[in-house]
């Protein structure tokens, strides 16, 4: 009985130490484990300079523009705090859309424009039928309209 | 029949568990078929099209159950392995060995369906983000467990070595599960979790849960079949196996 208890204590103790070690190691490698940097992180100088890295965020509404050469695309990736201009020449995934998530791999140019060699779409974890999305969109639009109306009324009352 | 209490410890011996497992297998196959068919029916014929991904999202009905099962089976396998290491139950090691191939199959399916899904939606088959990489490590852990066990001839020593590997690998499971929370990854966050309401249409969720149940029942059925043959192989020198094999119609005359 004694040796059995010892063995079980050893197993549990070993697992606890292992868990601690892994937690510390993962914590130390935190910056290597992220798949992409956000524009805010890049602005703060956390991204590697002169080396290839990935940036991720939302594609800003109304920012996708085709350059005069007809193949280069320019768009803005935002994390709602900071923006970054990305230039890309190549094929885009179907889910790449304004207002949706994207991850771009490439290098930061001297002019602050991110020259991407690959662009991936990052979709969210929501799955719903188109009608439901439509309904949510309508509800949001109504809420925005209501808010604007309330603000307008507040203004007129003040004046 | 005064004593209706069944002593569960009785079934810790292979001799008692063998016939019990044999009786349970058809039930689990039946449940697997019912849940699987219901889940696929809802998934492919009832659940609506997704607003973003169109029909392509329907691979979720295999991808998510496979991923869940690959993690869950590993936990169960490590539990049995740890029990065997701590208490020296004969059955524990056999259960762990019986679960490993099914776990490996689901880990592979998860990666494979993920790649097939990733190409059209993300634009790539594979990326080295935390979620995908840790799931690949899970597949390697399964394969390593199987390889390690089969490289040692003495079953007791094979069980011990395998158990240590299985227990060490357990740390990978929370890493897989929380990877999308702890680090930014290309893989999206969880649609279903214990802490928030699911971010899926209800019929989609039902299809996914039923498919997961189907895969779960399938795993139990297959693991029980596998553990039965492991029992026969390991205990072939015992009287009960001889008696079992001597029965007319059941593998007669193999030994």
Image (cartoon, rainbow, N blue to C red):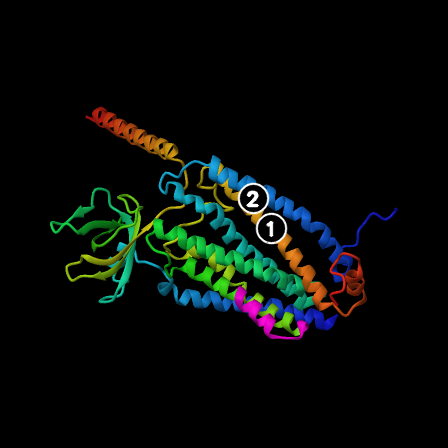
The answer to whether residue B87 is left or right of residue B179 is right
In the foreground, B46 or A32: B46
Q: Which residue is mark 1?
A: B218
Residue at figure coordinates x 33%, y 33% from the top left: A137
Residue located 39% across and 66% down the image: A29
Q: Quadrant of the N terminus of chain A?
A: bottom right
Whether residue A28 can be seen here: yes
Label 2 packing within 10 angstroms: few (<14), some (14-19), many (20+): many
Q: Which residues are magenta?
A: B142-156
Query: Does the magenta-highlighted stretch encompass residue B153?
Result: yes
Residue furthest right in the image = B2
Q: Which residue is mark 2?
A: B36
Question: Horizontally, is A72 left or right of B136 in the view?
Answer: left
Residue plotted at (44% across, 56% down): B112
Q: Is residue B252 left or right of residue B124?
A: right
Q: Secondary structure at mark 1?
A: helix
Residue A24 point in image, percent of width and height: 45, 67
Asked whether disc 1 touches disc 2, contact meaning CB atoms under 8 Å apart, the reply is: yes
**How far is disc 1 from disc 2 in space, using C-alphas?**
9 Å
Q: Position of residue B187 (x, y in %)?
A: 39, 53
Q: Quadrant of residue A33?
A: bottom left
Q: Say whether disc 1 or disc 2 marks the residue closer to the N-terminus.
A: 2
User: Looking at the rendering, which quadrant does residue B124 occupy?
Assistant: bottom left
- Crowding near pointer 1: few (<14 within 10 Å), some, many (20+)? many
- Determine whether B149 is above or below B35 in the image: below
């Amino acid at each position: 009985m004694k040796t059995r208890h010892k063995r079980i204590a050893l197993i549990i103790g070993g697992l606890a130490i292992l868990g601690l070690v892994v937690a510390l190691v993962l914590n130390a490698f935190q910056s290597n484990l992220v798949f992409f940097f956000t524009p805010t992180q890049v602005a703060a100088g956390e991204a590697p300079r002169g080396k290839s890295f990935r940036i991720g965020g939302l594609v800003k509404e109304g920012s996708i523009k085709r350059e005069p050469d007809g193949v280069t695309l320019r768009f803005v990736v935002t994390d709602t705090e900071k923006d970054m201009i990305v230039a890309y020449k190549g094929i885009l995934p179907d889910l790449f859309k304004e207002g949706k998530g994207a991850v771009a791999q490439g290098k930061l140019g001297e002019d602050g424009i991110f020259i991407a060699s690959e662009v991936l779409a990052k979709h969210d974890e929501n799955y719903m039928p188109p009608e439901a999305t439509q309904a949510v969109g309508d509800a949001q639009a109504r809420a925005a309209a209501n808010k604007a109306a309330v603000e307008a009324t507040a203004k007129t009352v003040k004046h | 029949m005064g004593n209706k209490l069944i002593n569960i410890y009785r079934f810790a011996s292979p001799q008692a568990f063998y016939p019990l497992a044999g009786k349970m297998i058809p039930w689990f196959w039946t449940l697997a078929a019912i849940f699987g068919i219901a889940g696929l029916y809802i998934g492919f014929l009832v659940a609506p099209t997704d607003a973003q991904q169109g029909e392509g999202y329907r691979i979720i009905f295999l991808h998510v159950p496979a991923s869940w099962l690959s993690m869950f089976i590993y936990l169960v396998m490590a539990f049995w392995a740890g029990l065997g290491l701590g208490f020296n139950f004969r059955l524990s090691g056999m259960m762990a060995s019986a679960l490993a191939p099914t776990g490996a199959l689901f880990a592979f399916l998860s990666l494979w369906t993920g790649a097939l899904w990733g190409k059209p939606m993300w634009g790539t088959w594979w990326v080295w983000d935390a979620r995908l990489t840790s799931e690949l490590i899970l597949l390697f852990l399964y394969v390593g467990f199987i390889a390690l066990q089969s490289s040692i001839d003495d079953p007791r020593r094979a069980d011990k070595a395998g158990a240590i590997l299985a227990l060490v690998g357990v740390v990978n499971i929370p890493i897989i599960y929380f990877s999308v929370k702890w680090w930014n990854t290309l893989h999206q966050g969880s649609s279903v979790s214990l802490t928030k309401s699911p971010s899926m249409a209800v019929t989609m969720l039902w299809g996914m849960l039923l498919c997961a149940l189907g895969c779960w029942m399938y795993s139990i059925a297959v693991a029980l079949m596998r553990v039965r043959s492991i029992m026969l192989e390991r205990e072939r020198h015992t009287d009960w196996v001889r008696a079992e094999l001597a029965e007319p119609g059941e593998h007669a005359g193999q030994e």
